[in-house]
Every structure is written in C-alpha cells, then in structure tokens.
Amino acid sequence: MVRIGGLASGMDIDSLVGDLMKAERIPLNKLHQKKQLTEWQRDDYRAMNKLLADLDKSIFDGVFRQSTFTKKTVTTSNEAAVSVRNVNATANLNSSIKVNALAESAYMTSAGRVVPEGSTFDPALPLEGQRGHFQPFAENTFTIQSIGKDGQMGAAVPITFDPAVDSLNSVINKINTSNAGVVAFFDSVSGQFSITAKNTGDNTAGAEIILSGDFLTSALKMDTTNQIAADAGTVPPRGKAGVNADFTINGLTTQRPSNIFTINGFEYTLKQTTATNVMVNSATDEEAIFKSVKDFVDKYNETIAGIKTKVTEERYRKYQPLSDEDREGMSEKQADMWDEKAKSGMLRNDSILSSALDKMRLNLYSRVGNGTDDVNDNYDQLAEIGIKTTSNYREGGKLVIDETKLREAIKNDPNAIYKLFTNDSTDPNSQGLARRLRTTIKETITTIEGRAGNAMRTNQQFTLGRNLTSIDKQINSFEDRLVKVEDRYWRQFTAMEKAIQKANEQSAYLMSQFYSG
C-alpha cells in the first residue's frame, strides 16, 4: 500500500499514526508485562526447588548415612605392618594382631624360551606370518581359570583370537582386559611368557591357575596348572602356589585369601610380617559427627530462611516490568532498581511454600515414636540432643544448637542419634526426623514442578508453562491485529491526503479561471 505522509495537508502523519498506535499497543504492553511476571514467578519457584534439592542432598550425604555416626579414628602401634580403617562398625576396637605370613599370588612361566634365541619374532606383528617361530598350534581359542577374591576358583574364561589379525601383544591385551583374573606378559629379553593371578590366596582344593588350549600349552610352552609348574623342579621354579594371609588376632590364629579383609566392621590391611603383636585401637570421632549434625542444622536454617524470605517478600504492584521504551528513558542504575522492585513478591504468601515450611517444622519438632514403640532408649526428640528453635518467632523456626549438650549426646550414644534422624518404619510417627523431612522435601519439589516445571519439561507439562504458551498466542494474535489497525490508519490518512490534494487542485483551477477572466 502506498502511504502518503502529509504532503497535501502539511500534517506529520507519521507522528499521528505513531501516537495512535501507542494507545492501541497498551493492551499488548500489558500482555508482555504479564508474560514477564509469569516468567519471574516460574524462575523463583525453580530457585526454591533448587534450595530444597540442595538440602535433600545435604541430608542424604550427611546425617542420613550411618557412616556419619560410625566415624572413628583408628590407630595401630605399627602402621607400616598393619593399617585398619572403620567400614561400618558401631562399637570401638581394642585388639592385637600378629602377622605370621602375607597372602601371595600364584604365578607360572613358560618352560624355557617361547621363541628361539636370536629369532626375528616381533610380538607386535600378526601371529599367522610368524608361526615358524613357535611350536605348532591349531586352536584359536583357549581358556583361563583363576582364583577369586573369596579364595574360590572362578569360572573358566574363553578367549578367542584370529592369527591373521592378532599379534602376541594383542592376545596378551585380551587376556589382561578379560574377566580371567590374571595378568600376562611376554619378556622379549628372556623370550619367556608369564601369567600371574590377580588375586592372592591358596586354593586348598588344587591349583590357583588352570589353562587349556594348545596356543598356551604348545606355542607358549605353559603347563596346564601353576601346581604342575611349581612341582617341575626347575631352578628357579617356573611356578608357585598362592599363599593365604596367616595371622593371630586376639590369640586366635586364622587365615584369609587376601591381605585386605574385614572383621567386625573394621577393614585390616596387612603389609608385612611381624615378630610381635600390633596393638589396634579405635575411638569415636566425635568432632566429625558434631560437624555433620551442625552442617545439617546450618543447611536447614539456610533453606527455611530462603523460603521465608520469598513468602514474606513485599509485592510492589506499582512497579510493573519495564518495556524497551521505558528502559531507554532510564539510566542503568534506575532500571536495575526498578527491576528489583518489580521482581519482588512473586511468591508472597504462596500456599505451596507456606505449607512446606509448616510441614518441615512439624517433621523436626515431633518426637520419633508412637507412644508405645520406643525407637530409642536415649533420644526421641531433637531437644534431647541439644537442638531447639529460637525464641524469636520472626525467624520462622530457625534451629539453634546447645553445643555442650550435643557433644555429650554424641559421646553417650551416637547410634541413637543416627536412629533419631533415620529410623525407618511403616508408622509415620516412628520414622526418623531426616526421613520425614526428605519425604516433605520430595513432595514439595514434585508439587512445584507441577506448577513451574524444570529444565527438562516443555511448557505443556506444567501450569505456568501452559499460561506462558497462552500469553504468547495472545501476543501473536494482538500483534497481527495491530498490523491491520496501523494499515487502516494509513489508508484513512492517505484517503484524506488524496481528498485534500484533489480539493487543492480544484481550488487552484478555479483561481486560475478567475484571474484569466
């Protein structure tokens, strides 16, 4: 459409249409403001979910783990010979251990050189072209069976190779990366092949390494078992049986297939034999337990403070989101201050978050037990271990710690504190405080995701997202309407300009007739 901009009338048609369109755009601006407010609300909801998820993770990694309350410092009188660490023991340790023998792995080597001395054999080249260097072999599959970590023989593991493709090095790599439980290598200097069990220990029923297949027994000159290799009488021996760790603990002599084993929740690592007893003692790491409980309290306080700030934040309704034109008329500082006011109060008095705060407080304040079932002999409420709420109700149930009382409770019965936090029961009243709290957190996160979604959801999968999609449709529809309105204004002004131009032409013609007469 040809637009005529005031040539006949002398009017600034562009400005007139622009001013008229500003009035027409007012409802569109309100839609953009509504969209921005919805996005801010969505983002605030998601920020609250992150806060709750962080608290849940902190609980799971801290007071929810039994290892948090079984932390112990363990000392031995000879760390170079025996080291001990706590795995899951609840009671402390006071014992002695004497190491009579260390566990050792079985091994076996080839009966002499695999390839003749001075041979041009290359372990990196395919086997097919180098068959002349070996004793004959016909099978392209062999098996290896070895002792497991438990001291029992594992299953025989088959290994297949292609002589046209595989080299000795690649066959060795297949052995070492398989589940056969051995380590193999070829020594190009001595020309010998070796296999060693990955696991230590003695198989009392027989050999610890069993081989089959003529590639191993013929080409690589290996015996069928490490027992046969050990009994061959060669010097040095070309095989050795596995050995169990032999030790005397608290007067009892016993064995294990490995130098690393667990007794009563403590993991022992034997490093060398000893002539005398090594004394082992443990003590509860009270400081580590105290820190874990304090970290939980601090994280809980941080979370409820963040939520309370949002649900009590002032809403400044006079401060609506700025349009691009509004922002251009302000300094950066003014715009930031305006945005701060406009964003405030998006979740004020929100029912989901307010309900979550109430439930979280109730989760922690209620006793653990149903009145007849005593979960703990010592502690069934937070207050009994020195954790209470502040007397200032404005702080929304913030927890404070009586450090002396908490340390005393930790010293007295750390396992009871663990049960106070994590006791599992079909009766909600008997569930531990942290278990209840995690349930509330997960329920709240799910509810918020139903309203505000998360980064993995599309707009159609949550309420505010559907609202945003609806607003976008309204905006697109309104923008199409504005294009038509602006075109109508221009048609009207163009028609006016043409009429004025025609009137001016007629007037000029009449004037010319008067003057010519």
Image: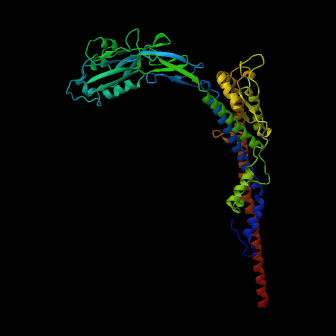
Whole-percent x, y for residue 432 in the image: 70, 24
**What's the residue at 77%, 42% (across, down)?**
311
* Left or right: residue 385 compared with residue 191: right
* Type of colouring: rainbow
Q: Quadrant of the N terminus?
A: bottom right
Return the residue nearer the eye: 129 or 382: 382
Picture quarter with the C terminus: bottom right
Relative to 350, is 25 above or below?
below
Residue 345 pos. (x, y %)? 76, 47
Instruction: Report the label total.
Output: 0
Looking at the image, is 107 positioned above or below residue 449?
above
Task: Please name whichever residue, 405 or 229, is drawn nearer the observer in this view of the structure.
Answer: 405
- Residue plotted at (25% across, 27% down): 189
Residue 437 placement: quadrant? top right
Residue 54, located in which quarter of the rendered image? top right
151 relative to 408 in the view: left or right = left
Q: Nearer the viewer, residue 58 or 452?
A: 58
